[in-house]
Amino acid sequence: MDLLNTLVDKGLRRELPTREEALAVLATSDDDVLDVVAAAGKVRRRWFGRRVKLNYLVNLKSGLCPEDCSYCSQRLGSQAGILKYSWLKPDEASRAAAAGLAGGAKRVCLVASGRGPTDRDVERVSDTIKAIKDQNEGVEVCACLGLLSDGQAERLREAGADAYNHNLNTSEGTYGDITTTHTYADRVDTVQKAHAAGLSACSGLIAGMGESDEDLVDVVYALRALDPDSVPVNFLIPFEGTPLAKEWNLTPQRCLRVLAMVRFVCPDVEVRIAGGREVHLRTLQPLALHLANSIFLGDYLTSEGQAGKADLDMITDAGFEVENAGEVTLPEHRAAGGCGSHAPAGDAVSEGTGCGAHAEAGCGSHAGGGCGSHETAGVCGSVPAPAGAARAETAGTESAGAETAGAETASAGARTDLVAVRRRGAGTDLAPNA
């Protein structure tokens, strides 16, 4: 297929595909999905080999969020039966993190629900970061706390935070349809603050919220322009008790096409499969490892994930290997420059590259705060759902046009049997799933 050959060539040169090419990837048929995976896999292996980075979520503060993000189980007015608790103490959070690190995770993502942290909250999280780093040499820590005020990103960096997550979630044109209590511009501002403070940028999207192919391409191109180091891709889990409870639009093949499109547009960036992979990719999860080089281990923010041992077995069985703590995740040309780094002179890179080459670079959580802050946000996490609801909080939806029939099929086959609210780990007395 000429399209795929062109995209592979561009990906190996870190050259930005055209919008038409990106849209064409999403419009490919299920019959061609293995060809799409094989092509994007060449780009993934060029920049990341067969390594898979493991990340582990710790939900520092669950539920009771004042924001109205439609996808989130922790949103204002949510009827989802999730765990609700206030801030974990530093030693409690450190114990929770230790379980994921013992399972092979090299990054801990500290998430808290809410619009954004107070200065007292930043102090709490700073104490937690120090506690985790004092007990685990070399661990990476990413904070996901919502919208940042002036000076807060700098304080987190001084405390030892390596990254900040703040997802864009969806396109600017449709943002107002999913959230009204803050704006797309608010998210961009937080990304700018995080990047200006020298934090590594982690910012991604949610697929499956009813967006079109054009919306998906818009948000991924916006992320390319922001140049984050990590792009989490969440697949919406329609939790009962939230406004998007009826949005069961994704098929495993659709999820693979979304991941492939992200890889072609962001060839040398850490692409992370976040919330919703177990629900929507299901038995095709191993194929997704040919596209993404990073996953979350075990449970998410408010929903249960695949068992940690099953994650490790899947990686090994698919012919991949867990990235060690001493290995640098990003390719040399990016890692050398720090957050997002700049491409070497003379490289065929398009305008979107460079460490925060654009002012908005940063790691964006969901508006409502939290790494992947609310349930669907994923990048750093997903959210639990009540029994019968969907369990992760990410997104991916069939877009208009060629995917309409597929969307109807997906809705008819909603797998509510796969949904489980997290009842163990952080905020409980039970051992976590790591």
Image: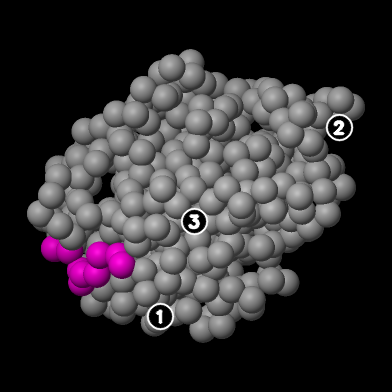
Q: In terms of sequence position, does the residue under pointer 1 or pointer 2 come before the other? A: 2
- Within 10 angstroms of label 2, few (less than 14), some, or many (20 or more) residues? few
Hey, which residue is sitting farthest right in the picture?
A: 2
The residue that disc 2 covers is 3
Residue kind at label 1, given as amino acid type: Leu
Which label lies toward us, 1 or 3? 3
Residue 265, percent from left and from top = 71, 43
Q: Secondary structure at mark 1?
A: loop
Total marks in image: 3
Q: Which mark is residue 237?
A: 3
Describe residue 220's horizontal placement relative to residue 169 as left or right.
right
User: Which residues are the magenta region?
Assistant: 81-89
For residue 54, say whether it is visible: yes
Q: In front here: 271 or 341?
A: 271
Q: Which mark is residue 76?
A: 1
Residue 191, percent from left and from top = 53, 65
Which label lies toward us, 2 or 3? 3
Which of the 4 image quadrants contains residue 36?
A: top right
- Within 10 angstroms of label 3, few (less than 14), some, or many (20 or more) residues? many
Q: Which residue is found at the position 49% from the left and 56% from the top?
A: 237
Residue kind at label 2, given as amino acid type: Leu
Describe residue 23's horizontal placement relative to residue 183 as left or right.
right
